[in-house]
């Protein structure tokens, strides 16, 4: 098992990628904030099929956390992450320090509308997507990948990045990958480690209620009453719901009734101090 090369600076990263490009190798980027789980590993597997070289970035991006969010306690497990990436056959890890990404005086951010202002995550985390879009653009500039992959678990994030890449003509192919789930349906997330044993037991109720609502909507029940029932089931399991909505899967615009277009059900809900998000297709 060979160890991935670790680059901590942009200069080290560029020296590495310049050699690969000279050899004619394509480069795939898997952006992460570390605390890697099987969902991240599945992204590296897909990327290894797509590109000759795979780089995983590990950077807990301060600008995408709000002032009362979990930036300082976000799990940081760099050694364990590197072991997983070595086993997955990843070529390199880019793990910059905050001041490498945000030099003194940094004051430029990406301004977004469209899916970034759909009234989902953005309604509860108003500065989040500007932080994500800015760091992702910077990672693209640093790595200059041919392709980059993002999990569908963060469905709105994926829509924002796809839109941004189109709007700014970023020369990188954006790939989405299916959400990986625990056996009981809970979407894998680095934040699941925050759950107490009792919360962990209750957590799959979110996905269960979403799947039940999707089934009744697919069989002809109107969206609104199906969501009312699902919200009640989610609340009964101990969650405080931020949102549970059905949206157009492409634009994330609201929809009143199922039509001839792809739909997505998206949710965010808090269990104790932990905020979980999930989404499922209504078209399967
Ligand atoms: O999805 C994540 O882990 C982060 O939002 C990302 C894309 C790595 C940007 O920091």
Image: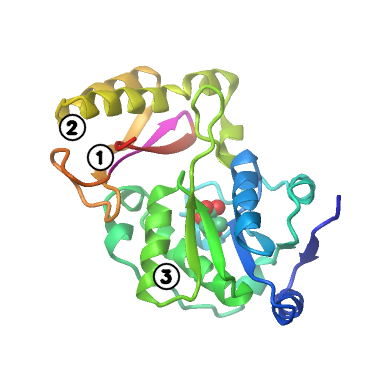
* Nearest to N terminus: mark 1 or mark 2: 2
Count residues near mark 1 (Cα–Cα under 10 Å), then give few for <14, some for 14-19, many for 20+.
Answer: many
Count of residue discs = 3
Q: Is residue 247 above or below residue 175?
A: above
Which residue lies under the disc numbered 2?
Answer: 223
Discs 1, 2 touching: Cβ within 8 Å: yes
Q: Is residue 62 visible?
A: yes
Taking the spot 34% from the left edge, 35% from the top edge, the residue there is 284
* Nearest to N terminus: mark 1 or mark 3: 3
Count residues near mark 3 (Cα–Cα under 10 Å), then give few for <14, some for 14-19, many for 20+.
Answer: some
Q: Position of residue 85 (x, y in %)?
A: 74, 50
* Nearest to N terminus: mark 2 or mark 3: 3
Q: Quadrant of residue 30?
A: bottom right
Taking the spot 40% from the left edge, 27% from the top edge, the residue there is 206
Quick check: 277 left or right of 117? right
Q: Position of residue 149 (x, y in %)?
A: 54, 57
Q: Position of residue 156 (x, y in %)?
A: 38, 52
Which residue lies under the disc numbered 3?
Answer: 165
Q: Which residues are magenta?
A: 263-272
Which residue lies under the disc numbered 1?
Answer: 246
Query: Would residue 14 be counted in the magenta stretch?
Result: no
| Local secondary structure at mark 1 | strand
| Local secondary structure at mark 3 | helix
């Amino acid at each position: 098992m060979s160890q991935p090369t670790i680059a901590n600076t942009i200069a080290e990263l560029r020296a590495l990628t310049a050699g690969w490009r000279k050899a004619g190798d394509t480069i795939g980027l898997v952006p992460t904030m570390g605390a890697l789980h099987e969902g991240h590993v599945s992204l590296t597997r897909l990327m290894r099929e797509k590109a000759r070289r795979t780089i995983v970035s590990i950077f807990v991006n301060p600008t995408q956390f709000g002032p009362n969010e979990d930036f300082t306690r976000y799990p940081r497990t760099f050694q364990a992450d590197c072991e997983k990436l070595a086993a997955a056959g990843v070529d390199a890890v880019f793990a910059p320090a905050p001041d490498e990404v945000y030099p003194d005086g940094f004051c430029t951010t990406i301004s977004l509308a469209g899916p970034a202002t759909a009234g989902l995550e953005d309604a509860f985390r108003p500065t989040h997507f500007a932080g994500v879009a800015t760091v992702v653009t910077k990672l693209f500039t640093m790595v200059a990948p041919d392709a980059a992959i993002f999990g569908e678990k963060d469905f709105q994030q994926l829509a924002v990045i796809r839109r941004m890449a189109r709007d700014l003509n970023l020369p990188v192919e954006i790939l989405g990958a299916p959400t990986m789930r625990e056996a009981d349906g809970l979407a894998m997330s680095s934040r699941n480690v925050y759950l107490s044993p009792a919360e962990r037991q209750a957590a799959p109720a979110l996905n269960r209620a979403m799947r039940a609502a999707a089934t009744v909507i697919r069989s002809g029940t109107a969206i609104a009453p199906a969501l009312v029932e699902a919200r009640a089931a989610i609340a009964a399991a101990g969650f405080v719901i931020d949102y549970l909505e059905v949206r157009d899967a492409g634009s994330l615009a609201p929809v009143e009734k199922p039509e001839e277009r792809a739909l997505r059900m998206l949710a965010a809900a808090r269990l104790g101090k932990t905020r979980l998000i999930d989404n499922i297709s209504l078209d399967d």
